[in-house]
């Protein structure tokens, strides 16, 4: 989704709390209210939804905590009152309705990585050169467009984020 989010950088929040030098990852967790959200009754997933970023990814200015979209307050369905938006990663990294943010030393587990590790890795960077085991990731259809277009490496943000992965094999760390 390439749409106008509003919010503030996660970095500005993290600077307020002054992470200890032992903090290497950020872990996010959401709410668990199966009475209101019947999908949470599915026994196949490790609810509540949880996600994680490496600290340097979290500190990048493209990583925002969003409180609205299209100039309006965030709708519940899109993650009110506050959600993550990480524009160079696949949309599922962007956890909605955040209730807890932790600074941790070890790489946190994530719901999709727990569910299917060979399909969904920790990094989940947009990468048209690496197919998902069951489908190509080379093209996309954007909201508001009819024709598919070529997907760009890091969703077009190579200049801003490629340095975070210098020396890493992104086929292995998918
Ligand atoms: N709290 C929470 N956040 C979540 C999810 C979820 O189940 N719970 N699903 C993820 C997945 S798989 C996707 S595809 C996106 C979809 O929401 P969006 O279209 O508003 O980005 O939210 C992500 N964030
Ligand atoms: Mo999804």
Image (spheres, rainbow, N blue to C red):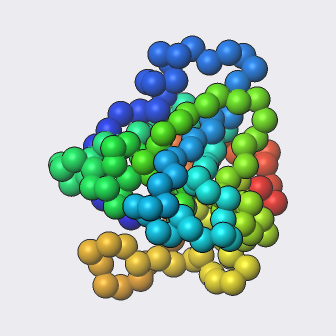
Question: Which residue is nearer to you in this view: 38 or 79?
Answer: 38
The residue under the point 77% across, 65% down is 117
Q: Is residue 78 left or right of residue 71?
A: right
Q: Residue at x 59, y 76 (%)?
A: 137
Query: Is residue 172 shown left or right of residue 137?
Result: right
Quarter of the figure with the C terminus: bottom right
Extreme residue toward the left, this view: 71
Question: Residue visible at 27% across and 55% down?
Answer: 75
Q: Is residue 99 left or right of residue 129?
A: left
Q: Against 162, is 133 above or below?
A: below
Give me the residue at 31% from left, 56% from top.
76
Note whether 43 is above or below 113 in the view shown: below
Residue 141, picture quadrant: bottom left
Q: Number of numbered discs present? A: 0
Q: Nearer the viewer, residue 141 or 78?
A: 78
Q: Is residue 116 above or below residue 155?
A: below
In this picture, is 55 found above or below 143?
Answer: above
Q: Position of residue 147 (x, y in %)?
A: 35, 85
Q: Quick one: 39 or 18, which is closer to the camera?
A: 39
Residue 80 in view in this figure = yes
**Image location (x, y in percent) of residue 64:** 42, 40
**In what quadrant of the picture does the N terminus appear?**
bottom left
x and y, in percent, of residue 106 in the image: 78, 35
Locate residue 91 relative to residue 116 in the image: left or right: left
- Residue 163 seen in the current view: no
């Amino acid at each position: 989704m390439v749409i106008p989010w509003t919010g503030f950088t996660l970095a500005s929040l993290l600077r307020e709390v002054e992470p200890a030098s032992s903090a290497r990852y950020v872990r996010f967790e959401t709410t668990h209210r199966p009475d209101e959200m019947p999908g949470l009754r599915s026994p196949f997933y490790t609810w509540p939804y949880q996600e994680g970023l490496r600290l340097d990814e979290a500190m990048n200015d493209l990583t925002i905590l969003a409180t609205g979209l299209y100039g309006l307050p965030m709708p519940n369905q899109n993650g009110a009152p506050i959600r993550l938006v990480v524009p160079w990663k696949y949309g599922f990294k962007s956890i909605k309705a955040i209730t807890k943010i932790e600074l941790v030393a070890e790489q946190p587990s994530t719901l999709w990585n727990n569910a299917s590790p060979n399909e969904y890795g920790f990094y989940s960077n947009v990468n048209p050169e690496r197919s998902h085991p069951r489908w190509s990731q080379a093209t996309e259809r954007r909201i508001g467009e009819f024709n598919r277009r070529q997907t760009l490496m890091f969703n077009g943000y190579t200049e801003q984020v490629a340095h975070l992965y210098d020396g890493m094999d992104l086929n292995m760390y998918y």
